[in-house]
Amino acid sequence: MSSLMQGVIGFAVFIPCIVFHEVAHGYVAFLLGDPTAKSRGRLSLNPLKHVDPFGTVLLPLLLTATGMPAFGYAKPVPINPHYFKDYRKGMLLTGLAGPATNLTLAIVAGLVSRGLVAAGLFQTTVGYWATFVLYEFALINLVLMFFNLIPIPPLDGSRVLPIFLSDTALQRYHEFERYGVLIVFGALIILPRVFNIDILGTYLDVTVRPIMTLLTGV
């Protein structure tokens, strides 16, 4: 299989992964009393509701073209924590909703992929492509899950962290949030390309790879 075809399939699989991730955030927020995402039409599985022209399309293509791992993001689902009865609990649950959804999807896709291999169906043309797409779907979901659990704004881990912080520490953490995007892009681009330090790659290797092997046997 050509690298171009792998890239096309990876990009096509990436879209539903991030759509389910974002819708999960909005749906859990809605269950907790926040109607913001629903009122703005963001509880839809229509990809056009969630695609960010730069983060979902241009950034992954640019990274792939420069030989770097494809990465991207969707438009964040709007959440208003003022609707939550308990701010910390509400942020925790909405923050975990996206990664939990990715984990569920990865488990299902990975086990089905493994089942196709065990049954020998991957030797047929249809079975081969189905196995490959399911494997990629599981892999991308796990990457999204573990990446988003990093406790740096605007990633989902930053919504989980407040449950462990005192009021004073939480205030200081909010002041730090403005630098979160710079830190994330620094870890993604500057450290690997300039200093040859791939912290993110190492982190994903020790988290994603063992689970992929457990799920798919590969």
Image (cartoon, rainbow, N blue to C red):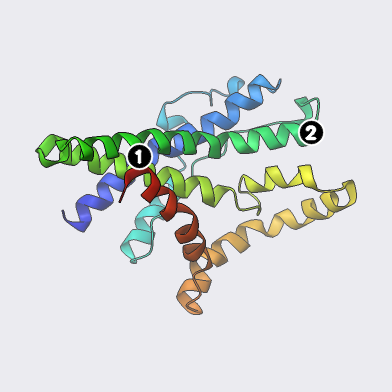
- Contact between labelled residues 2 and 1, with CB atoms less than 8 Å apart: no
The spot of residue 201 in percent (x, y) is 46, 64
47 to the left or right of 203: left
- Distance from disc 1 to disc 2, alpha carbons, whole Å, reads 35 Å
Above or below: residue 30 compared with residue 144: above
Report the label total: 2
Residue identified by numbered label 1: 110
188 to the left or right of 14: right
Type of amino acid under label 2: Tyr
Does any portion of residue 71 appear in the rendered image?
no
Name the mark nearer the viewer: 1 or 2: 1
Type of amino acid under label 1: Gly
In this view, the residue in front, 118 or 28, is 118
How many C-alpha atoms fall within 10 Å of the one at disc 2: few (<14), some, or many (≥20)?
Answer: some
Does any portion of residue 10 appear in the rendered image?
yes
Residue at the extreme bottom of the image, as rendered: 195
The spot of residue 95 in percent (x, y) is 64, 38
Q: Residue at coordinates 78% horizontally, 29% vertically from top-left?
A: 82
Label at residue 71? none
Q: Residue at coordinates 35% horizontally, 39% vertically from top-left?
A: 110
Above or below: residue 214 compared with residue 88: below
In this view, the residue in front, 64 or 218, is 218
The spot of residue 6 in percent (x, y) is 24, 51
Q: Residue at coordinates 87% horizontally, 48% vertically from top-left?
A: 166
Quick one: SS at disc 2? helix
Label at residue 87? 2
